[in-house]
Image (cartoon, rainbow, N blue to C red):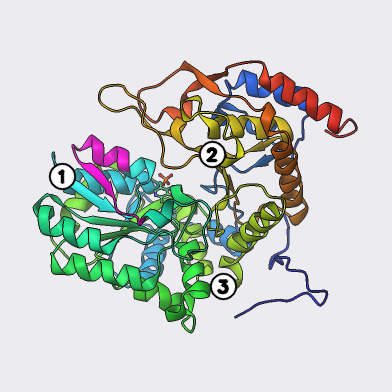
Amino acid sequence: METISFFDGRKIPLERHKVRIVQKLNLLPVEERLACIKEASSNLYLLHNKDVFLDMLTDSGVNAMSDRQQAAMMQADDAYAGSESFYRLEKTVQEIFGMEHFLPAHQGRGCEKVIADLLVQQGDIVPMNYPFTTVKAHIKRCGGEVVPLLYPAGLECQSDNPFKGNLDTDALEKLLEQKGDKVPFVRVEAGTNLIGGQPFSFANFRETAAICRKHEVPLILDASLFQDNLYFLKIRDEECKDLTLREITRAVADLCDIIYFSARKLGFARGGGICLRESELVNPLKELIVLNEGFLTYGGMSVREIEAIAVGLEETMDLSITSQGPEFIAYMVAELEKRSVPVVTPAGGLGCHLDASRFVPHIPQLQYPAAALAAALYIAGGIRGMEHGTFSESRDADGNEILADMELLRLAMPRRVFTMSQIDYAIDRVTWLYENRDLIGGLCFKREPNILRSFIGELAPLSDWQEKLAEKFSRDLPNSL
Ligand SMILES: *Cc1c(COP(=O)(O)O)cnc(C)c1O
């Protein structure tokens, strides 16, 4: 292991990169932050980025690129068909995952769309460790239903279970025995997003694959957040600790029939793609890619991004690069725990997740506690997180609200973007907010869209709590922004 210890005993993640290009950030005064959140209808997606100090909304498409990626982008081969850039990416993907075919897509949901169009029919069910918003929407669009098969332990916010992303294999076996003819594929998500970036173990994935094989159902891996799962396999899984990241990746890939990913996350750039072995699925998928995404040698991506992904995937196989995100997240989670702030444990990938159900227990789920916490944290520090709770659910067929399993505010940690003092600032403002949590109130819809409502829905506070929170901040920190 490439660990670094401080002589004085502190445990501080050490950046293994240096900064060579910077972007100026604005930290607006609290009164202006209050005005901005009102203008954005308390939905952080509707803020202008110039008004955000720390953008912790997502890691999607906003990871810092390396000098090697930037250099590769200069040699991009612009061609509608047959671009050399694509062949370079195809070769890298083939080497890393060991699969023969690589079909490019503009981003992760493009992969999910064509896979659902080809494989999901009315009445189908798709078991998975846990659904992600976009895959669920595409499976539903095609008339199918998703069945989450996470162990109950995966949904416990406070835990020391190292593999909360594991799929309940007994439940999968039973489901395939009873309804196997309705199951077009089984999907497993690496670094399971909506439960706090939690990984699966190698043993669990192998057992899942064996059950799929026995019932002749294809196993599809959503590898969008594989980078984090890979890190956790290396450091938490006895079975993998002596293998290189490249060997672990191959061992996982060898168990899959199809792997798809969002290269907005995996590969530090922007794009996506599907890897698969020779089978009768290859040609129909190619047709859908050409129809929906673009020709087979770009799939909606710019050739410059294609070059950057190829280098980014190689860099993902380097532990000193891959460890940066999870180490920063572990630091933030540990510091917040010390201050008794409720966070999801153990620390996962992707970001630090605040548990809104314990942070603001006085706000009922139908007043969107995690969305309220998100708006409050923007007022408290100009920090933009992402709600993962009831606000992100959609109503059932009868128009009833669906209460989320968890009410989380994710503070994403884009790779190589923030410094330690910025993370310390975020810890400090979250702590101030926790001390003042009683001031945070609920939200209701002003305008509610029919699909993916958390992206463009407009909310309003149920009282003047946002003004009161801003006033308290000015009193507590009179000489600070
Ligand atoms: C982000 C994400 C997707 C969708 O990818 P996009 O590039 O945003 O379309 C799919 N699955 C998981 C697990 C993700 O995190």
Q: Which callout, 2 or 1, points at the residue further toward the start of the chain?
A: 1
Q: Residue at x 47, y 58 (%)?
A: 198
- Which percent across, then down, holds residue 455? 47, 30
Query: In which quarter of the view is residue 42 placed?
Result: top right
Q: Which residue is mark 3?
A: 319
Of residues 204 and 106, which is closer to you in this image?
204
Identify the magenta region.
136-151
Characterize the local packing of mark 1: few (<14), some (14-19) or many (20 or more) Cα atoms within 10 angstroms: many
Q: Which residue is located at x 60 percent, y 33 percent?
A: 373
**Ligand 1 near label 1 (Cβ, under 8 Å)?**
no
**Pointer 1: what residue?**
124
Does residue 149 appear left or right of residue 30 in this picture?
left
SS for dot 1: loop
Residue located farthest toward the left when viewing the structure as drawn: 181
Which picture quadrant has residue 438? top right
Question: In whole angstroms, how far apart are the C-alphas of marks 2 and 1?
Answer: 33 Å
Tell whether position 144 is magenta: yes
* Residue 219 drawn above or below residue 239: above
**Mark 2, residues whose alpha carbon is within 10 Å: few (<14), some, or many (≥20)?**
many
* Structural distance between the alpha carbons of marks 1 and 3: 40 Å
Quarter holding the N terminus?
bottom right
Can residue 470 be found in the magenta stretch? no
What's under tag 3, amino acid-wise? Leu
Is residue 302 in sight in this rendering? Answer: no
Q: Is residue 371 above or below residue 420?
A: above
